[in-house]
Image: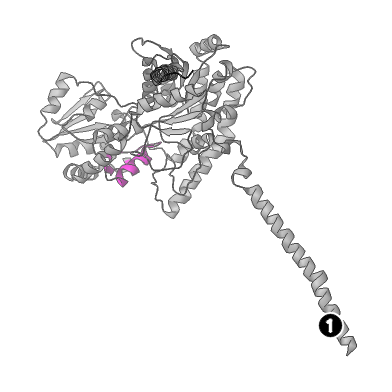
Amino acid sequence: MLCSIKEFSSKMNSLTVIGVLSYITCCSAANILGIFPTPSYSHQQPMLALSHALAKKGHNLTVITANPSKEPMKNHRDIDISYGYKEWQRVQAMNQMSLQVRITPSKLIADGYNFFNFFTSLVLGSPDVQELMRELNGTKIDLILYESLYYSSLLGFKEITGDPPVVGLLTLHPFMTNELPQGNPVFPSYVPFTFSSSCDKMTFWERIYNLYLNIYSQYIMEYSLKPLQESYLRKYFNNVKHTAEELEYNKSLLIISADLASSYPRPVQPNTIYVGPMHIVKPKPLPLDLQQWMDEAEDGVIYFSLGSNMKGTSVPEEKRAAFIEAFKKFPNKRVLWKWEADIELPGKPENVLCRKWLPQQSILAHPKLRLFVSQVGIQSFQEATFYGIPILAIPMFADQDFHARKIVESGAGLSLEFDDITFENVYEKLKVLLTNQSYKEGMMRLSSITKDKPMSPVDTAVWWVEYVLRHKGASHLRPAVLDLTWYQYFMIDILIFVLAILFIIVYLLNFIYKNIVKGNINISYYNKKKSE
């Protein structure tokens, strides 16, 4: 007997509720392992923002991190590798390496082996990490979050925890070495290398240099980093089924903490998601003395900070003097200077306030802030963009040249080479930026781009992580290009086949002409002559 419309509606509502509850709970309380090895605050911030958000949603996280929480957090267990900061400083001093000087893209690429060799051994050699390996061996993990630079051997955790799906996290713009494992096409003709100072509209010579950087980085990857990671994988994880390269190429998803406000359009596969700056949070109130000092600024505030790697104390005396003299020329403007020393800044003007540490996001959010003098690491660039603060960029290494060019191209600020820092250059740049409203307007355009999203970057990243959990690895996102050889991808085999067919046709036509057509012509001519 058919049920009534009312009964049918009631049953359907029950089924809908059950379906929604199933959808909500299908990935609840997942056990997630986070592998965040790089001891750099700017790298750790966005990844920890995601892991903390997942813990707050009820998932259970165990996270290898260089920045453990100061206070215990529910559902979030930290495996502390913060000693990596001091170790890295020690190694730099021992090898006369420095992040306080101008470094070329080629030099950074060439140093890739030393960088990844040090940090990979640092993590896998940690007693706490080795204890975690023993603890997790044979335990089922639902998902791995992995800092997707090139620490492929660390994905050996996938082998010992039931082959969970892997979601890669990237806190800067991708390189060819990040793009290829996702199946993303790489076009050096208009996609600038992340360490270059090019934009997406390159000159002929810029395209040559861009191609060179891509080829060189891939060479280092193939002949240095892949063997390195393979050796660490075999050393620390016994009886692995896959190579380090196979593990790197088998990520379900890559989440990138960036967007088009800080980069340029590029083609990506569905398994690559740009979410925007995950680390930006509602700014905390400033300390009362700092709040009052900024509030009372007669004509606004300039903020001077060279980030977490480059120290203000490392700036040579003559270049510091150039800024000091330039700031004196704007007595009605106040200057906040991040100065990492216990001694007072020599020659400090009255309008300058120095602090060893400053709450950057809260400062950038202050309505009296007019300008940010920055090294333009990606997090600083993103924060200034979010709050609409024009930038005087002083790039030193890595992706900072890339960001400086984007800022200039977008009309959101100016760039100054470190070697060109003189009083005259600094003063002229500051005067233009502080008096020309177009730079504020340019940065506000970028700000509107980064803010115009249906969900916050962290919420978007959480949704995609749970999407991978719901779909058991989301294998439907994996492009078939990852199963092709290089000659299949570029259709070299088809080209050879077509050329072979054309060659055969030309050969046969030539054979027919020489041996049949031409022969018949000769016979006809001979017969005609004979008959005459």
Q: Nearer the viewer, residue 367 or 481?
A: 481
Q: Residue at x 55, y 11 (%)?
A: 139
Q: Name the spot of residue 447 as percent of width and height, x first.
A: 27, 37
Q: How many neighbours does mark 1 have within 10 angstroms: few (below 14), some (14-19), or many (20 or more)?
A: few
Seen from the viewer's position, the closer of residues 222 and 267 is 267
- Which amino acid, by three-letter code, is at mark 1? Tyr
Image-quadrant location for residue 18: top left
Find out whether residue 460 is within the magenta segment.
no
What residue range appears in magenta? 392-417
- Residue 274, image x, y percentages: 40, 34
Task: Where is residue 228? Give x, y as percent.
Answer: 57, 28
Say if 124 sits above or below 457 in the image. Answer: above
Residue 59 appears left or right of 374: right
448 up-or-down from 234: above or below? below
Q: Please tell me whether mark 1 sits on a helix, a strand or a loop.
A: helix
Determine if residue 317 is in view: no
Residue with the mark numbered 1: 525
Q: Quadrant of residue 133?
A: top right
Residue 413 within the segment the image draws in magenta: yes
Image location (x, y in percent) of residue 16: 41, 20
Q: Residue at x 29, y 40 (%)?
A: 446
Which residue extends farthest right?
530
Colouring method of the image:
one colour
Residue drawn 28% across the image and 35% down it: 385
Quadrant where the C terminus sits is bottom right
Res 435 seen here: yes
